[in-house]
Structures are given as structure tokens and as C-alpha cells.
Amino acid sequence: MIRQLVAPYWHIFYDLLMAGRRKKFYGTLVKPGDLCFDIGANIGDRTSIFLALNTRVVAVEPQPACVQRLERRFGNQITIVAKGVGAEEGYLPMHLSNANTLSSFSEEWINKVQQERFAQYEWNETITVPIITLDKLIATYGVPSFCKVDVEGFEVQVLRGLTQPLPMISLEYTVPEAKENLLEVIERLDSLSESMRFNYSPGESMRLALPDYIPASDFKQLVNSPNFKKSKFGDVYAKSSQ
């Protein structure tokens, strides 16, 4: 009987549990008053955590439906930029999925993950959206203490619009489908700062897998290892002392 009563509300308990774990984890990375960029904010799951930690948030999201949700959810508590982020300013086609978390600018990424990992989803609509660069965002709002990037395979293009190291940045990864993309991300970040060091958090574990941040050369070896492949997805964290 208890199981029958609890089952309909399990997703609520799970969401509360994850929110608590995320707040605890990100609380080790940011402090009150910090500026955070949420690139690929979607409907604001990470934005809400950054706000709960009393940071200032610039949420960047190109999907109109998600932008409307962000506006309803947060109002003037955050700055919303209704654009995509890429290598240069302009306009690009975005491929919308029936799961808004999987919408992407990258046809290559879609073609790879659609073969197996996300075979049950579709990308049947394409819209044209304005693009801004990380450099332009920094010029407008300042250097973020933390920058979260979740752009479904478009990470390299996002980083090509950045010409300075950031104190800390996180980028989502999926392996093995987008392993080469991840290696290029590491190389790009390493080129911005000799002091860049790397760690990662597998899945939704909300914990760093390594006891210490390591240089790019060591991290690339790790990415090529069988154990890293088993993680399937997660976030890479890179920090610079510059």
C-alpha cells in the first residue's frame, strides 16, 4: 500500500533529491555574488541552482518555448539572452527535437546519437536563430566566475568564440559518439591558458571523479581509456588560474 501511495510522487522526490545534490556540488564551485553564465539554459534547471546560491545569472537559450518558460519561472531575477552561442555572430539553423533538451545546432552530433543512444527521439523542425559569441557576452556582462555550457555537440563552435581563459567552465560530453569532439574541446581550452586543468563528473553523480584537476595531456589520455568510455555522459570541468 505504501509503495502504491508513494509511486505517483516519486519523480517529485527525485527532483528534490537532485536539486539538493546539485546545490551542494555547485556550492563548492561558486560563491554568493559570483557571475554565472548558463549557456544552453533550456528551462533553467541549473539556473535555479545558481540563483539558490545567490549568484548573478546570465541565461542564454535560443529555443523560443524555453525562453518563455525562463521568463515565467524567473522574471527579472536573471538576465535572459534569447540567442545561441557560436564561433561568430550571425544566424544559424537550429534543429528542434521533440525533447527540448536534445535540440542542437550540430547535425553531426544528431546523426551520431540518433543511431542508438537517442534513437527514440526525432528532430523534425528547424528554425533560424541569432548567434552571439562568448567574447561578446563577456564584453557585455563581464567575465563569469563560472560558465556552464550544455549545447548538444556544438561545444567546439562555442569555444571558438572565446579568446580568453575563464576561471572555470563546464561542458557536457557524450562518449563514445562524441569523443573526438571532446578531445577538440580539451585542446581548445588548453590553448587559451597554460594553467588550464581538468576534471569530470560522470552522469548526474554531482561529484568530481578525480581527486585533483590534471593537465590537458593527462586528461586526453583518460578520455581515451576504456573506463572513461563506460561513463557514457557527464560534464568536464576546466579551471584556469589566469
Image: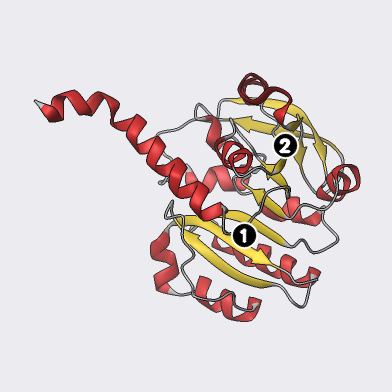
**Left or right of 29 in this view: 168:** right
**Residue 138 to residue 99: above or below:** below
Q: Is residue 173 visible?
A: no
Q: Find residue 42 and report its image quarter.
A: top right
Q: Is residue 228 visible?
A: yes
Give the residue type at disc 1: Asn
Circle number at residue 119 = none
Q: Residue at x 28, y 31 (%)?
A: 10
Q: Which residue is mark 2?
A: 60
Alpha carbon distance from label 1 to label 2: 22 Å
Give the residue type at disc 2: Val
Badge 2 density bin: few <14, some 14–19, many ≥20, Cα 10 Å:
many
Circle number at residue 181 = 1
Quadrant in which the C terminus is drawn: bottom right
**Left or right of 13 in this view: 151:** right
Q: Are marks 1 and 2 in contact (CB under 8 Å)?
A: no
Q: Residue furthest right?
A: 139
Q: Residue furthest left?
A: 1
**Residue 31 to residue 82: above or below:** below
Q: Nearer the viewer, residue 123 or 205?
A: 205
- Point out residue 74 in the picture as x, y percentages from the top left corner: 65, 26
Q: Nearer the viewer, residue 14 or 82?
A: 14
1 or 2: mark nearer the eye: 2
Q: Secondary structure at mark 1?
A: helix
Q: How is the image coloured?
A: secondary structure
- Point out residue 193 in the picture as x, y percentages from the top left corner: 79, 72
